[in-house]
Image (tube, rainbow, N blue to C red):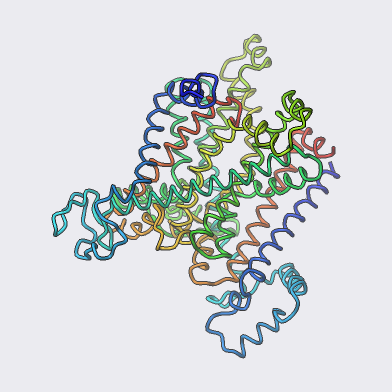
């Protein structure tokens, strides 16, 4: 398939790109998202110091205001935290953790939800009832409550947080996929595929799934933003990530104690970064929703 | 109607049972209950006594019935830290949380409905664009971050409002609340705003969509043709139709606000159950954590039940759908 065909107006990717392109706000947000994603990926090459390398940290440099210089002439453009870490470096590492946790849990939840949603829609009957009962039960409780319950019982830790985030997200995907797949299931092309003797897994994945993608993409974007925000909240409360995996939420929590004494930069800058990240993902997601399906979720 | 209420009630009981089982599994099967429910500095004799009284030497299913039986009698263990029944601690702090949540809800409605109306009546105008972008900002901002900014601006920089605690409480009709003294009110403002901001975005969006869906309907055209003033059409006729979805969602969101109060209470040191939960997790005071989870889930299931019943009163289609 040539690149031209891929970006054509009637292709999904083409619709996404032109849809975003028509809204200046969404273009800015998308560019910000890409920059942040890029910064997170190449993080270690971007930061002036490794904030976890104790050898390069100097406690005399702690709590320096933005713009100050270290003993060896390095500039701390965003200041330093209580341990003398360069805030900019710590933030880029925090961004890696936050984005990593958000995107990973989002993708796994998407996979789990998609599989269960497809199964529920295609087979119907008892399986459908069972899966949807569980989905309703999950969606009946607010995200933060379920995550709190789990982490209160399990204790903190990176994989526990990821597990909690997957658990609170999969049901949203399952419901969206099921309702999209129910519509597709009764269309002629599926019947044709069945008549041709194509196997069930292949019909589900190769034929029905691609037509369920638009709502999945939108919900995926919004869920990643939610997951990042939820992880930051849990970490801020001290029941999310451990101190060895500092996400943006944890950086903010560390700086929170110093906020009152005027050392604002330690929590405000990571906070601004978190805000920019979640805000731009939400803007892009909101725009995609308008482009792909004006009715979806417009409550 | 009766059938619907009974069926819905049984459903709630079922959900409550499932939650109890999950919490039970969390404590007894995944973790070590002796480790969780016995204070770390208990003597071996005390330990043996608690093990016997909790029946930890019995089979798992028997332990579950002991757990459920005790829970039904309001016995959810004693707090290690306060050495008092944990359920009593929860109910002592519950009024503070309810006060905060309800005030937050009122804020969200008082600000959200007018903004949503303005936005929905002039869709795609500059005002609409500003309000809608603002509402995305509202749910993009993590709650704890909003709270910090409120403290930084209004307490640290401007020094207008206090940032911690509940302040002085007054008594009115036998209810003690911060709402009845000036000092208490100033303490309540920031936390309540913090808690309401997230829901504010939702109320704005709901109202806006409601207005946009209702305005093109025939009855509005008919009302116009009759010569009814635009103001009366919007505030009486259209408004009534927006209220139905709004009431349902608000009822459901009340539960999620109770959960989100954990964040707000932690930031503003508000002495409610949310702060109690986080403090108890930090102090490894697990009986209180377990009691909190069971109480908040019961409360949540109860609210859902009430909302569903109310909704079926307003909209008969719901209970007819449920009967199929």
Q: Left or right: A49 with respect to B65? A: left
User: A14 or A106: which is nearer to us?
Assistant: A14
* Residue A218 figure quarter: top right
User: Is A178 located above or below residue B169 in the figure?
Assistant: above
The single residue placed furthest to the bottom in the displayed view is B45
Q: Position of residue A285 (x, y in %)?
A: 50, 33
Q: Position of residue B185 (x, y in %)?
A: 45, 51
User: Is B282 located above or below residue B226 in the figure?
Assistant: below
Q: Position of residue A48 (x, y in %)?
A: 24, 51
Which residue is located at x 39 percent, y 57 percent? A246
Q: Position of residue B31 (x, y in %)?
A: 61, 71
* Residue A295 figure quarter: top right
User: Is A90 located above or below residue B75 in the figure?
Assistant: above
Which residue is located at x 53 percent, y 33 percent? B204
Q: Quadrant of the C terminus of chain A?
A: top right
Q: Left or right: A168 with respect to B10? A: left
Number of residue marks: 0
Which residue is located at x 77 percent, y 36 percent? B318
Which residue is located at x 52 percent, y 72 percent? B284
């Amino acid at each position: 398939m040539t690149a031209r065909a891929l970006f054509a107006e009637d292709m999904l990717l083409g619709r996404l790109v032109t849809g975003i392109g028509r809204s200046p706000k969404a273009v800015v947000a998308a560019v910000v998202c890409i920059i942040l994603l890029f910064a997170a990926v190449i993080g270690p090459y971007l930061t002036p110091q490794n904030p976890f390398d104790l050898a390069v940290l100097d406690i005399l440099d702690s709590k320096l205001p933005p713009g100050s210089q270290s003993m060896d002439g390095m500039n701390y453009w965003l200041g330093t935290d209580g341990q003398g870490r360069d805030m900019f470096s710590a933030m880029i590492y925090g961004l890696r953790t936050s984005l990593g946790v958000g995107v990973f849990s989002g993708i796994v939840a998407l996979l789990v939800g998609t599989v269960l949603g497809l199964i529920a829609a295609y087979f119907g009957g008892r399986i459908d009832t069972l899966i949807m009962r569980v989905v309703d039960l999950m969606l009946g409780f607010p995200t933060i409550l379920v995550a709190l319950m789990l982490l209160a019982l399990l204790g903190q830790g990176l994989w526990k947080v990821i597990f909690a985030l997957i658990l609170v997200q999969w049901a949203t995907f399952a419901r969206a996929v099921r309702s999209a797949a129910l519509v597709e299931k009764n269309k002629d092309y599926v019947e044709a595929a069945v008549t041709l003797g194509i196997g069930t897994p292949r019909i589900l994945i190769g034929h029905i799934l691609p037509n369920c993608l638009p709502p999945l993409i939108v919900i995926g974007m919004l869920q990643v933003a939610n997951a990042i925000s939820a992880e930051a909240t849990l970490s801020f409360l001290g029941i999310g990530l451990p101190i060895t995996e500092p996400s943006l939420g944890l950086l903010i929590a560390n700086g929170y104690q110093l906020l009152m004494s005027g050392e604002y930069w330690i929590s405000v800058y990571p906070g601004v970064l978190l805000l920019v990240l979640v805000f731009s993902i939400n803007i892009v997601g909101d725009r995609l929703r308008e482009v792909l399906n004006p009715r979806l979720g417009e409550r | 109607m009766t059938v619907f209420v009974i069926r819905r009630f049984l459903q709630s009981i079922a959900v409550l049972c499932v939650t109890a089982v999950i919490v039970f599994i969390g404590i007894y099967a995944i973790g070590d209950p002796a480790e969780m429910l016995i204070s770390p500095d208990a003597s071996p004799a005390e330990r043996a006594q608690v093990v016997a009284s909790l029946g930890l030497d019995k089979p798992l299913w028997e332990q579950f019935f002991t757990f459920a039986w005790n829970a039904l009698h309001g016995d959810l263990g004693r707090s290690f830290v306060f050495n008092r029944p944990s359920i009593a601690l929860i109910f002592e702090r519950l009024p503070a949380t309810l006060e905060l949540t309800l005030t937050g809800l009122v804020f969200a409605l008082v600000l959200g409905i007018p903004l949503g109306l303005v936005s929905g009546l002039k869709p795609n105008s500059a005002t609409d664009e500003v309000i809608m972008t603002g509402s995305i900002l509202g749910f993009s901002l993590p709650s704890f971050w909003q709270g910090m900014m409120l403290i930084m601006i209004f307490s640290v920089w401007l020094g207008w409002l206090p940032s911690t605690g509940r302040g002085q409480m007054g008594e009115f009709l036998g209810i003690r609340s911060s709402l009845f003294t000036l000092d208490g009110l100033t303490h309540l403002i920031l936390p309540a705003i913090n808690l309401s901001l997230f829901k504010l975005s939702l109320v704005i969006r709901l109202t806006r969509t409601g207005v946009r869906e209702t305005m093109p309907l025939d009855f509005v055209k008919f009302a116009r043709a009759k010569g009814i003033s635009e103001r009366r059409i919007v505030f009486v006729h259209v408004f009534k139709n927006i209220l139905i979805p709004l009431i349902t969602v608000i009822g459901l969101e009340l539960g999620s606000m109770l959960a989100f109060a954990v964040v707000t209470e932690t930031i503003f040191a508000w002495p409610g159950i949310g702060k109690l939960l986080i403090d108890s997790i930090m102090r490894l005071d697990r009986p209180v954590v377990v009691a909190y989870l069971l109480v908040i889930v019961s409360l949540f299931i109860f609210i859902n039940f009430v909302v569903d019943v109310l909704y079926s009163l307003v909209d008969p289609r719901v209970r007819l759908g449920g009967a199929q």
